[in-house]
Amino acid sequence: MASASLSLSSTLPTLSSTLRTSPNISFPLHSLSVPSNSLPAPSLSSSLTSSWVSRLHPTTRQLGSRSLIASATDMASEKRVFDSGEDLAVSLAKYTADLSDHFAKKRGAFTVVLSGGSLIKCLRKLVEPPYIDSIDWSKWHVFWADERVVPKDHVDSNYKLAFDGFLSQVPILPGHVYAINDALSAEGAADDYETCLKHLVSTKVVDVSAASGFPKFDLMLLGMGPDGHVASLFPGHPLLSENQKWVTFIMDSPKPPPERITFTFPVINSSAHIALVAPGASKADAVYTALGGGSSQNAETLPVQKVAPEGVLTWFLDKDAASKL
């Protein structure tokens, strides 16, 4: 079994042959193909149990004294609220599978960005029928919105979290999983990851935004912390204003471990689709601030309020997270 981790060395012309071996971690080599018959375009899951689904456009819907999303683009936001975590996971799986089918047929690849935290557990239905058998996993290319600068087999590693809970159970090609080079410093790992992304943009594996010039991922799956942070972009941190780099690093994360790399907001917001997955009562205050017109306790804009993709932002919430809306 080969490792799922790809070493993002600076010798990008030989990128496809630089598979790293991570201690105690292996990965399936096989791929899976699906029939060529068309599947439905991305749509609402029938497992949506809430009585309301809201689609809002910044130009037409106001919440409180501000637009729901402050964006220069005509960007739509949809929120889905579910009675249980199980219903949320079912809907998220269908949403992801529909987008996978759409982009695999449209451009021959599906670029997916993962996060840490509770997100991976919310993807659990993808490893079950019908999706484990119907998705063309060979088209998937997997990235991370942020990563802790620790070995890949460390308990704090987002790679390990994703591997244990998702990647080890689906036949994504090993060379299509882009983990950080954990042998480098935080700054070196961020530079290395950005170099890798630029190579993948140049080879058209990753799309590029015509509007921003930043990489345009097909689907970015973001979690959110109780403080409203996304990726490793924390409230009040200077990195919230970074608008040149694709990938940057942080040495003083308020949440351990302190050293991390993270996508910047220009990359996040160039995405075609963003799923913001935020279940749980601990997220209720931040959800209210972002969606209900509330104010954060320190009167600062929460990082999650800066999420404004070129395409569609879809919130996946359970009743507890949406309890203050």
Image (cartoon, rainbow, N blue to C red):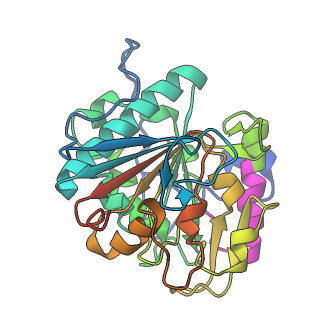
Residue 47 position in % (x across, y down) = 19, 39
Look at the picture and state if 245 lies above or below 86.
Answer: below
Residue found at x 73% / y 38%: 208
Total residue callouts: 0
The reply to whether the magenta stretch includes residue 186 is yes
- The segment highlighted magenta reads 180-197
Q: Position of residue 293 (x, y in %)?
A: 46, 64
Q: Which secondary structure dominates the residues rendered in magenta?
A: helix
Q: Is residue 17 left or right of residue 198?
A: left
Q: Name the outermost residue toward the top.
A: 37
**Quick check: 269 left or right of 136?**
right
- Quadrant for the C terminus in the image: bottom left
Tell me: residue 204, above or below residue 243: above
Furthest toward the front, the residue is 65
**Viewer-proximal residue among 54 and 232:** 54
Residue 8 can be seen, yes or no: no
Find residue 65 and report its horizontal and vertical position in percent. Answer: 54, 62
Closer to the camera, 247 or 34? Answer: 247
Can residue 304 be seen by looking at this rendering? yes
Q: State the residue at coordinates (40%, 24%).
A: 33
Q: Position of residue 310 (x, y in %)?
A: 63, 42
Up the image or down, 96 lies above or below 190; here it is above
Is 254 included in the stretch rendered in magenta?
no
Q: Which residue is depicted at the point 45% across and 70% down?
A: 294
Residue placed at 47% from the left, 78% from the top?
227
